[in-house]
Amino acid sequence: MNAFVRYATLFVYKIVYNFRIEGKENLPEKEGVIIASNHRSYADPVLVTIPMKNHVTYMAKEELFKNKLFGAFIRFLGAFPVKRGAGDMKVIDDCVDILNSGRNVVIFPEGTRSKENKVGRGKTGVALIAAKSGADVLPMGIVFEGEKLHFRSKVTLRIGKIIKAEELDVGDGSPKELKNAKKRIMDAITELVEGEKTVEALPDEAE
């Protein structure tokens, strides 16, 4: 997301929501990282990209691109279409190619939106992508009360500490290793979302 769009989006989100960011000191300088977050609303892909200063891509279902104007807009924001029913390995390989090209990829490991501020168990796809790409993982947590966002809802985006690829210890990518790596990622997200004080509280940020 370029600087102008990022600032404009943050401005709009601060009007529509009571939006704050915590943990910006944890943002990595390098590119080609996996941004792994819990999934609460349709606004999540934009929420998690706002603090990122380098290129971010994320998956979006193919149907969202049928409207040419909206499709062009979300492509501009970094979305790429995923066809429902397509093989999982095709999506994983696409993500690996994007990461290897030096772009960041947003992944919501739960695979579906969760209710309230509880995090699901997640799927091992995020660990497999990390294993095949060798990318670091940046955990994020989206927190707001209730099941849906409303005007002036208090929304907090918490950015955790980077998880280095070697910390995931995926080895040969056996099912057990992938399961352990997935748990490491999901534990980090859960701590951000459900922990009493998971990152140092920061004042509302202007960017």
Image (spheres, grey):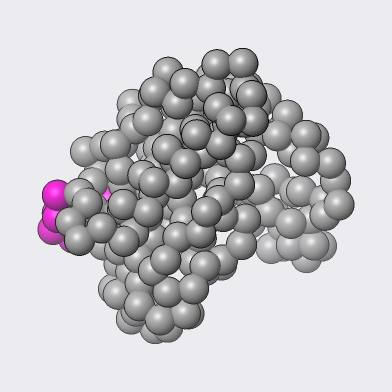
Q: What residue do we see at 42% from left, 38% from top?
A: 184
Query: Residue 29 placed where, x, y %?
Result: 33, 26
Q: What residue do we see at 42% from left, 66% from top?
A: 118
Q: On screen, 77 above or below 131? A: below
Judged left or right of residue 9, residue 174 is: right
Judged left or right of residue 95, residue 196 is: left
Nearest the eye: 171 or 150: 171
Query: Residue 131 placed where, x, y %?
Result: 58, 23
Judged left or right of residue 158, residue 25 is: left
Q: On screen, 85 above or below 112? A: above
Query: Residue 182 placed where, x, y %?
Result: 51, 39
Query: Residue 61 placed where, x, y %?
Result: 74, 56
Which quadrant of the structure image shows residue 129?
A: top right
Which quadrant of the structure image shows residue 93?
A: top right
Residue 195 is inside the magenta segment: no
Q: Which residues are magenta?
A: 200-207
Which quadrant of the structure image shows residue 188?
A: top left
Q: Is residue 70 visible?
A: yes
Q: What residue do we see at 47% from left, 80% from top?
A: 147
User: Farthest residue in the front direction?
Assistant: 176
Q: What residue do we see at 64% from left, 39% from top?
A: 125
Nearest the eye: 122 or 207: 122
Q: How many marks?
A: 0
Q: Is residue 98 visible?
A: no
